[in-house]
Amino acid sequence: MAAAIRIIGIDPGLRRTGWGVVETFGNSLTFIAAGTLKSTAEAPLASRLCELHEGLRMIVGSQRPHEAAVEETFVSKDALATLKLGQARGVAMLVPALAGLDVAEYAPNTVKKAVIGVGHGDKRQIHMMVKVLLPKAVFDSEHAADALAVAICHAHYRQSAAFRIAAMARAAGNV
């Protein structure tokens, strides 16, 4: 008999990292929790990354997801900002991986397509559809709503052949 799968979606950012947890059972989705981690803007970069690491570690520990999904980095013209975002994204991938979870990555357009049906849409459309798909969802920021969208995306795509193959290889110790 199949069991519900708990998924944590993460929208990484150095200032604010959104997280959202859903459960999927067959075609049904259930909202579990969501929130936003904030790092101290005045702190050194290493300290801010530690804050994100500790916050995500506590969330993964308390929410006990089975799988994780992280949004891929959006590359801006500001190389330093992109580099810092990449470092925050590294933490967002590291924490669930250290907890033994398989971590999937999704491009922003893939997330939009899974949630609103097209690869190009604005934040309002995404947040509206998150509320339609998860009527009981409560989120404290656009980052948390985006993280729920990443989790929803993973719920739709998690059965893809590539993800299943990667998960089986990891379980077998081949990765």
Image (cartoon, helix red, strand yellow):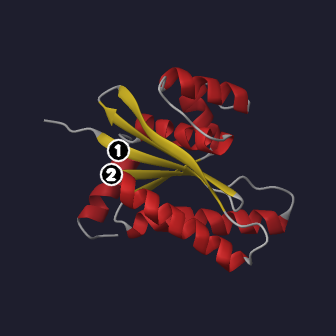
Q: Name the residue carrying label 2.
A: 66
In the image, 9 versus 15, the foreground residue is 15
Q: Secondary structure at mark 1?
A: strand
Q: Amino acid at mark 2?
A: His
Residue found at the far left of this picture: 1
Q: From this view, report whether residue 82 is shown above or below residue 7.
A: below
Task: Name the residue: 55% across, 37% down.
Answer: 149
Q: Position of residue 54 (x, y in %)?
A: 52, 69
Amino acid type indicated by mark 1: Arg
Circle number at residue 6: 1
Q: Is residue 27 above or below residue 150?
A: above
Camera-nearest residue between 47 and 159: 47
In the image, residue 43 above or below residue 7: below
Q: 58 or 74, which is in the foreground?
A: 58
Q: Is residue 21 left or right of residue 76?
A: left
* Residue 19 visible in the picture: yes
Measuring 32% from the left and 53% from the top, which residue is drawn there?
Answer: 165
Cβ–Cβ under 8 Å for marks 1 and 2:
yes
**Residue 2, percent from left and from top:** 18, 36
Q: Residue at position x 34%, y 25% from top?
A: 27
Q: Earlier in the sequence, mark 1 or mark 2?
A: 1
Q: Give me the C-alpha separation between circle 1 and circle 2.
A: 5 Å
Q: Residues within 10 Å of mark 2 (few under 14, many from 20)?
A: some
Task: Determine whether, in the image, residue 122 is placed left or right of residue 112.
Answer: right
Residue at 42% x, 65% y is 97
Badge 2 element: loop
Q: Residues within 10 Å of mark 1 (few under 14, many from 20)?
A: many
Classify residue 61 by image quadrant.
Answer: bottom left
Where's the C terminus, which quadrant?
bottom left
Q: Give coordinates of residue 114: x percent, y percent.
A: 54, 31
Rendered location of residue 1, percent (x, y) = 13, 35
Query: How many discs appear?
Result: 2
